[in-house]
Amino acid sequence: MDSIGPSGEAPLRAGALLLAAGRSARMGGPNKLLLELDGEPMVRRALRTLQAVPLDPVVVVLGAAADAVRAALAGLPACRTCSAPQAEDHQASVDAGLRAFAAPVEAIVIMLADQPLLDADDLRWLLAQWSVCARGGALVPMFAGQRGNPVIVDAALRAPILEAGSSVGARGYLAAHPALVHRVETPNDHFVVDVDTADDLARLAGRGLRAALPGAG
């Protein structure tokens, strides 16, 4: 990639992990990542957003409904997939993605697949904030005091996070090393809105997104 970085500086090399391994237990129905928003599966919308930044490579972490999720991503530019051994464990998903991520990049964006308000401009803004932070740390978006996603970690943190083990994970490692964490207030709430329940879907309708079951039209 070559489109990110302050003017006059070498472009930032950044990739991403897209976490798409959960079972959507709180949705009470189909896997939420396959729900169609404006006619597009939510997981496909998330991957398309990452690739539009552009971020490369993108590793998609799969778990429940892995075959269906792969099918929902068909036709997009190539990405790598891996499987999380414990799909319901968020830190296990991050661990699996980091283990599969071996590209020579400077930064890794760790993104949830259920944040449909995020767009490429939001992610470019966040990367611009990261580019002026001290290297070797992580950037956490905040909105009105609420912690958001995605988080950006320096690629140099990949090894120590993995050494800490999946029971600690990226969040536990960063909590134990608070000096590494930079927080930034975001200009909108896109970073803190995700989809876990049917009520969350109803609220998205109020933001102009049409939600439908797969194939419902």
Image (spheres, rainbow, N blue to C red):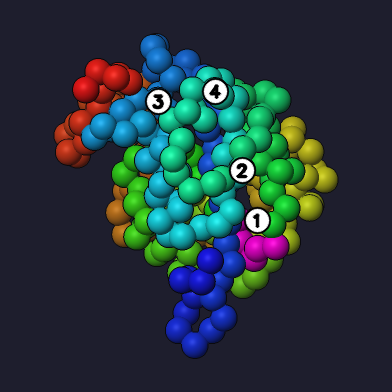
Query: From what the image shows, is residue 126 above or below residue 191?
Result: below
Q: Earlier in the sequence, mark 4 or mark 2?
A: 4
Q: Earlier in the sequence, mark 1 or mark 4?
A: 4
Q: Residues within 10 Å of mark 3 (few under 14, many from 20)?
A: many
Separation of disc 4 and disc 2 at Cα? 14 Å
Q: Earlier in the sequence, mark 2 or mark 3?
A: 3
Kindly check if marks 2 and 3 are in contact, taking CB atoms under 8 A apart as contact: no
- Residue name at image x 19 percent, y 39 percent: 207
Q: CA distance from mark 2 to mark 3?
A: 19 Å
Amino acid type of the residue that numbered disc 4 sits on in the rendered structure: Asp
Q: Alpha carbon of mark 3 to alpha carbon of mark 4: how far?
A: 11 Å
Which residues are drawn in magenta? 104-108
Amino acid found under the numbered disc labelled 2:
Arg
Rendered residue at 46%/71% (across/down): 3
Q: Given this view, does label 1 or label 3 mark the residue nearer the observer?
A: 3
Q: Give me the residue at 17% from left, 38% from top.
A: 208
